[in-house]
Image (tube, rainbow, N blue to C red):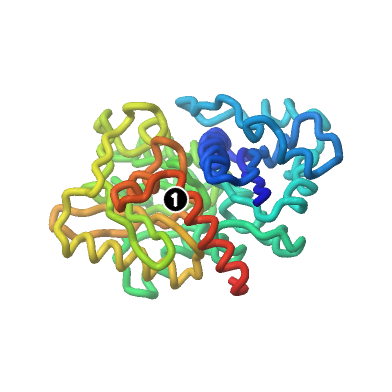
Amino acid sequence: MNIVVLAGGLSPERQVSLVSGTGICRALRNKGHRAVLVDMYLGIPEYSGRERDVFDAPDGLCGEVSIQSEAPDLEAVRRSRADQSSRLFGPGVLEACTAADVVFLGLHGECGEDGRVQAAFDLLGIPYTGSGYLASGMAMNKAVAKQMMERVGILTPPWRELIYDEKDIPRLTEELPVPCAVKIINGGSSLGVALPDTREELEAALRDTLRYGGHVIVEEKLFGRDIAVGVLGNDYLPPVEIIPRSGAYFDYAAKYQEGGSLEICPAPVTKQQWRTMGEATLRLHRALGLTAYSRADFILDGDGRPWCLEINTLPGMTPASLLPKEAAAAGMDYDALCQEILEQSLAARQAGR
């Protein structure tokens, strides 16, 4: 098949996305597909206007990419775009996607996981991988996802949703409990997340997350073990435990820098804990109407109870990412995982999901 692997975009997670997309593209080419990596925002270099020519590009336009220790400068990305357009789809992107048999979504964060790209593709009749627009938008919004967890009986830490501006910060600093977790409403890769233990740290966290729009959830800070559980098709995968080597929480650097964390898969948990987390992930996946694959994050507290934090509709697919490690523990290598996601997604699209 001719496949566009769509990655990059204009999200704080664009570097993660490009690394994921590069791995996916090469895996699909190993499987015999004519796959090409396309940056959604910057578009196709020297696009000729002949859409199908792009699938003959050497190595699928995959370059050498890496994830830096800090999120990218999006203003610099904007300035680097040749046509200086404000459109989120760069030159040649929609033309290539229309010419493809399917688009494999390697996007992360806003404009990738929030349903807008999926909605555009639905309107244009372009098949794509992963969940549909409504399910993606619901899962990306942490408040909506939390409401669904509570509705289907999944333990999640007590939380509240806040929309605030600069003048609200002094009041919120005194009003909110500490310690707590402050998370932007639609973030990923631990960007826009703070875990303040004091009121001074809480004030700093509120000021920092304000740059993302001032829309957050604040939840009780739980202490325990970080566990992630993936779903592939109709089954849950072996859980993975994440232990940041710095001793801090599983932040952006710990997730993506080599040696930033220790991941143990399958996680050393009881069969009952494995089953409880797996069934909860599958229940949430289905309640939100997700498709093909996802990954939920849990805290396993000192009493052995799993508390669900969030669910990811386009989980990372970098060499350091959790879902490929879970699949490997289940006997599926990276190339086979990409092929399975492709097949599960196409079956869902054909069924109207």
Q: How many marks?
A: 1
Height in image: 136 above or below 320? below
Q: Quadrant of residue 234?
A: bottom left
Q: Residue at x 63, y 43 (%)?
A: 35
Residue farthest to the front, as pictured: 32
211 or 294, which lies in front? 294
* Front one among 63 and 244: 63
Q: Quadrant of the C terminus?
A: bottom right
Q: Is residue 15 left or right of residue 149?
A: right
Which residue position holds label 1? 337
Residue at screen point 61% across, 67% down = 349
Q: Position of residue 283 (x, y in %)?
A: 37, 70
- Drawn side of residue 73 relative to residue 125, left or right: left
Please tell me whether mark 1 sits on a helix, a strand or a loop. helix
In the image, taking residue 101 as reference, residue 276 lies left or right, namely: left
The x and y percentages for residue 69 are 45, 26
Q: Residues within 10 Å of mark 1 (few under 14, many from 20)?
A: many
Placement of 177 over or under 306, stated as above or below: above
> Quick check: can you spot residue 206?
no
Quarter of the image holding residue 273? bottom left
Expressed as whole percent of the image width and height from the top left, the position of residue 185 reads 50, 53
Relative depth, front residue between 73 and 318: 318
Residue 4 position within the rendered picture, expressed as x and y whole percent measured from the top left: 66, 46
Quadrant in which residue 29 is drawn: top right
- The residue sitting at 34% across, 40% down in the picture is 196
Whether residue 154 is visible to the viewer of this picture, yes or no, is yes
Q: Amino acid at mark 1?
A: Leu
Identify the residue at the far right of this view. Answer: 49
Q: Nearer the viewer, residue 91 or 147?
A: 91
